[in-house]
Protein backbone atom coordinates (compact mmCIF):
# COMPACT_ATOMS: atom_id res chain seq x y z
CA UNK A 1 0.00 0.00 0.00
CA UNK A 2 1.36 3.41 -0.94
CA UNK A 3 1.77 6.03 1.71
CA UNK A 4 1.54 9.71 0.85
CA UNK A 5 3.06 12.59 2.74
CA UNK A 6 0.37 15.12 3.60
CA UNK A 7 1.64 18.68 3.90
CA UNK A 8 0.76 20.56 7.07
CA UNK A 9 -2.15 23.00 7.04
CA UNK A 10 -0.52 26.41 6.50
CA UNK A 11 -3.69 28.51 6.68
CA UNK A 12 -3.46 28.94 10.43
CA UNK A 13 -0.82 31.19 11.95
CA UNK A 14 1.48 29.87 14.61
CA UNK A 15 0.47 30.69 18.19
CA UNK A 16 3.60 32.33 19.54
CA UNK A 17 2.51 34.11 22.71
CA UNK A 18 1.55 31.61 25.38
CA UNK A 19 0.13 29.20 22.81
CA UNK A 20 -2.96 31.42 22.67
CA UNK A 21 -2.12 34.45 20.54
CA UNK A 22 -0.27 34.83 17.29
CA UNK A 23 1.77 37.96 16.55
CA UNK A 24 -0.99 39.70 14.59
CA UNK A 25 -3.48 39.24 17.42
CA UNK A 26 -0.91 40.48 19.92
CA UNK A 27 -0.20 43.62 17.90
CA UNK A 28 -3.94 44.38 17.48
CA UNK A 29 -4.44 44.11 21.25
CA UNK A 30 -1.30 46.16 21.90
CA UNK A 31 -2.53 48.83 19.43
CA UNK A 32 -5.90 48.98 21.23
CA UNK A 33 -4.16 49.40 24.58
CA UNK A 34 -1.95 52.14 23.11
CA UNK A 35 -5.00 53.93 21.70
CA UNK A 36 -6.72 53.72 25.08
CA UNK A 37 -3.64 55.12 26.82
CA UNK A 38 -3.44 58.03 24.35
CA UNK A 39 -7.14 58.85 24.78
CA UNK A 40 -6.72 58.75 28.56
CA UNK A 41 -3.66 61.02 28.42
CA UNK A 42 -5.41 63.53 26.16
CA UNK A 43 -8.66 63.61 28.15
CA UNK A 44 -7.06 63.57 31.61
CA UNK A 45 -6.27 67.30 31.52
CA UNK A 46 -9.57 68.22 29.86
CA UNK A 47 -12.26 66.35 31.82
CA UNK A 48 -10.45 64.91 34.83
CA UNK A 49 -9.29 61.52 36.01
CA UNK A 50 -12.30 59.22 36.42
CA UNK A 51 -14.22 60.08 33.22
CA UNK A 52 -10.99 60.01 31.21
CA UNK A 53 -10.18 56.60 32.71
CA UNK A 54 -13.60 55.22 31.76
CA UNK A 55 -13.41 56.55 28.20
CA UNK A 56 -9.80 55.37 27.83
CA UNK A 57 -10.80 51.93 29.13
CA UNK A 58 -13.49 51.70 26.44
CA UNK A 59 -10.95 52.60 23.75
CA UNK A 60 -8.64 49.83 25.03
CA UNK A 61 -11.04 47.26 23.59
CA UNK A 62 -10.94 48.58 20.01
CA UNK A 63 -8.30 46.05 18.98
CA UNK A 64 -10.11 43.00 20.38
CA UNK A 65 -12.58 42.50 17.47
CA UNK A 66 -9.73 42.83 14.97
CA UNK A 67 -7.70 40.25 16.91
CA UNK A 68 -10.32 37.55 17.54
CA UNK A 69 -13.40 37.96 15.31
CA UNK A 70 -13.42 35.90 12.11
CA UNK A 71 -15.97 36.16 9.32
CA UNK A 72 -15.95 33.72 6.40
CA UNK A 73 -12.59 32.36 7.59
CA UNK A 74 -11.01 35.84 7.35
CA UNK A 75 -9.91 38.17 10.10
CA UNK A 76 -12.08 41.26 10.52
CA UNK A 77 -9.39 43.53 9.05
CA UNK A 78 -9.00 41.33 5.94
CA UNK A 79 -12.78 41.08 5.54
CA UNK A 80 -13.24 44.87 5.72
CA UNK A 81 -10.32 45.39 3.32
CA UNK A 82 -11.79 43.02 0.72
CA UNK A 83 -15.26 44.49 1.19
CA UNK A 84 -13.93 47.99 0.56
CA UNK A 85 -12.07 46.85 -2.56
CA UNK A 86 -15.22 45.17 -3.86
CA UNK A 87 -17.31 48.31 -3.34
CA UNK A 88 -14.77 50.39 -5.26
CA UNK A 89 -15.09 48.19 -8.36
CA UNK A 90 -17.10 49.38 -11.33
CA UNK A 91 -20.28 47.33 -11.43
CA UNK A 92 -21.41 48.18 -14.96
CA UNK A 93 -21.04 45.85 -17.88
CA UNK A 94 -18.25 47.16 -20.10
CA UNK A 95 -19.69 45.74 -23.34
CA UNK A 96 -23.24 47.05 -23.01
CA UNK A 97 -24.45 48.77 -26.18
CA UNK A 98 -26.15 52.13 -25.84
CA UNK A 99 -28.80 51.41 -28.48
CA UNK A 100 -30.07 48.22 -26.84
CA UNK A 101 -32.76 48.57 -24.15
CA UNK A 102 -33.46 45.64 -21.85
Image: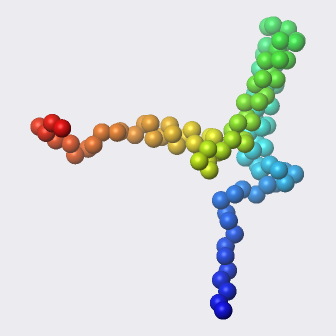
Is residue 67 shown above or below 58?
below
Q: Quadrant of residue 34?
A: top right
Q: Dividing the image into 4 quarters, which one contains the N terminus?
A: bottom right
Residue found 76% across the figure and 57% down from its top: 14
Residue found 57% across the figure and 38% down from its top: 80
Q: Residue furthest left?
A: 99
Q: Dividing the image into 4 quarters, which one contains the C terminus?
A: top left
Residue 64 in the image: state x and y as whole percent: 74, 36
Is residue 9 shown above or below 81?
below
Is residue 16 shown above or below 54?
below
Q: Residue furthest top?
A: 47
Q: Quadrant of residue 19?
A: bottom right
Residue 66 visible in the shown view: yes
Residue 61 in the image: state x and y as whole percent: 77, 30
In this rendering, position of residue 59 left or right of residue 83: right
Residue 96 in the image: state x and y as whole percent: 21, 42
Amino acid sequence: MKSYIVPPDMREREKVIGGVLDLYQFFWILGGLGLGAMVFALLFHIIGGTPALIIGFVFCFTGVPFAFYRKHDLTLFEYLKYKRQFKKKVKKLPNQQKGVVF
